[in-house]
Image: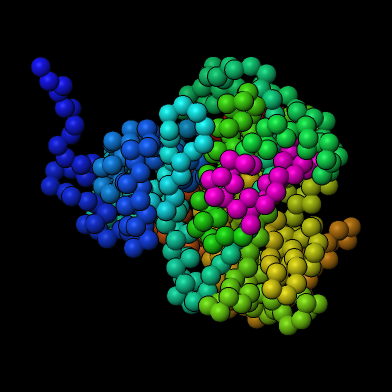
Amino acid sequence: MYARSWSRPYGEGGVGRSSFVAEFGLWNDEQTAAAEQIEAGLHDIDLVRVAFCDPHGLARSKTLTSQAFQGVLRNGMDFSPGPFIFDTGHAVAVDFQSGDPGIGVSEITGAGNFVLVPDPLTFQVLPGDGPRTAWILGDEYLRDGSPHPLSTRHVLKKIAARYAERRLTPIVGLEAEWYLTRRLDNAAGNSGNGFGLQGAAPAVEAVDSGYQFNGDTAYASVAAVTNPIAMDLVALGLPLRSMEHESGPGQIETTFSPMTALDTADAMLFFRTYVKQSCARLGYHASFMSLPRVDSFDPSGWHLNQSVIDEAGRNIFAADGIAAGISTEGKSYAEGLMDRARAYCLLSVPTVNGYRRLGAEHSLSPTRIGWSFEDRGAMIRVVGGGSSTHIENRVGEPCANPYLNIAAQLHAGLEGLDGFPGTTEPVRVGSEPDARAETLPQSLPEALDAFRSGPAADLLGNPLAACLVKLKESEAGRYEAWAAEARPTGTGTTEWEQREYFENF
């Protein structure tokens, strides 16, 4: 007797295809070398989670055996386009059964597969007991080897390449706030759930009383959860700088040292995913929703720190002399951000809930478009001096798609470097704001209007811009239909938002 071999005679790429990656030249030398190292060590791995980022900023994945991953690494893997079709509540927003789904991507018709090709440079072996598991991000491609028009990671790669052509490198620093709560039960919240109908949000309680900003005792109340996560992130190679307690009960701010744009976006996606899953294993719940519907919570933001260095390693935002503020080039970059602030707001604040933060009392979140030195009430805060000079954009919410949020900043900044004089003066913020300053959108529908009428296709391409409009129209429309029937009172977070965002984000 003998053991039957059930191995497939062909790789994931199909009959006659030796390597999807090689056929279309999808990797550079660094990726090829990294793939060889992965292959040499796969005997120490049991499972590999192959993931990508959907338009909403959520990681979608399949878990493979290490044997199956051997073929997938160089051949790619078929994925359904569902994450491009469903809105945040899993309602069908893009009519894939129509002869023309209306976004200019024929492969969406009939929900045809796309090919996800793992990026060897993102391979991580996850800590923990149980099966030895690795995690790797992939890039989306069509069957002809061209980048998928709906891939947000490709958008960021393209804008980073434009900087590289000019021998410039954008540097981005992460500063994200999130909430840690304790779960009260393990109910799945599936009652009433379905396509466009999210079940009950997790029942939680606060882990501390909050409102002792940066209190050491407040941090100690969460350290049993956050410290092990911090050590895991460091062990995984992420440049973690700090974990600190913010104002709200169990509100944590996490910061990372500056990285290149793509590394920053990859890190943000992994960080959010890993934090949520680590907390869940311990009976806690982590949420990057901006303002959960929990008593006394304070809005959370995502502050995106930015600078640009030239080929000599010089920070082009640095003015002559430490006290000189910011260079003309830095002001031009900031002017580009301000010029596109309304049109690109949807990419930084993509949810109904995120707009509850902008202008909220004591949140130091912006409403007016402008820049200022060291003023946390400004949309754009210029920080530091000399070689450390950088811009902090304070608009974003922590659950935004990291590739789109960062790409929008870099695209607008490059337009500023190319076409703005760098002469705008700082705005007055605080008790007497400059009434002449234009305001940011104050709701998802308003942001959608600005996005539709703006130059989004220049950054995203027509298909992705059209897809995002459909996804966000569906999300906003479902909320408005609910609100018309439920008639919520006040300005606080609604039950609909809590169901829609608290668990998934």
Q: How far across and down, in percent of the image, does residue 64 sit?
A: 34, 34
Which residue occupies 79% across, 47% down? 363
Tell whether 296 sits left or right of 46. Answer: right
Indicate the quadrant containing the C terminus: top left, top right, bottom left or bottom right. Answer: top right
Tell whether 448 sits left or right of 322. Answer: left
Q: How far across and down, in percent of the image, does residue 387 sit?
A: 69, 73
Q: How is the image coloured?
A: rainbow
Q: Nearer the viewer, residue 261 or 199?
A: 261
Which residue occupies 81% across, 77% down? 323
Tell me if residue 373 comes above or below residue 294 in the rendering.
below
Q: Nearer the viewer, residue 227 or 274?
A: 227
Q: In the picture, residue 416 is in which quadrant?
A: bottom right
Which residue occupies 70% across, 31% down? 224
Which residue occupies 55% across, 32% down? 277
Asked whether residue 349 is in view, the answer is: yes
Indicate the quadrant containing the N terminus: top left, top right, bottom left or bottom right. Answer: top left
- Toward the left, the furthest residue is 1
Tell me if residue 475 comes above or below residue 499 in the rendering.
below
Tell me if residue 243 comes above or below residue 297 in the rendering.
below
Which segment is the magenta one? 230-257
Tell whether 420 sits left or right of 86. Answer: right
Q: How far across and down, in percent of the image, does residue 465 sit?
A: 46, 54
Q: How many marks?
A: 0
Q: Nearer the viewer, residue 304 or 442?
A: 304
Q: Quick check: is 245 in the magenta stretch?
A: yes
Q: In the picture, residue 366 is in which quadrant?
A: bottom right
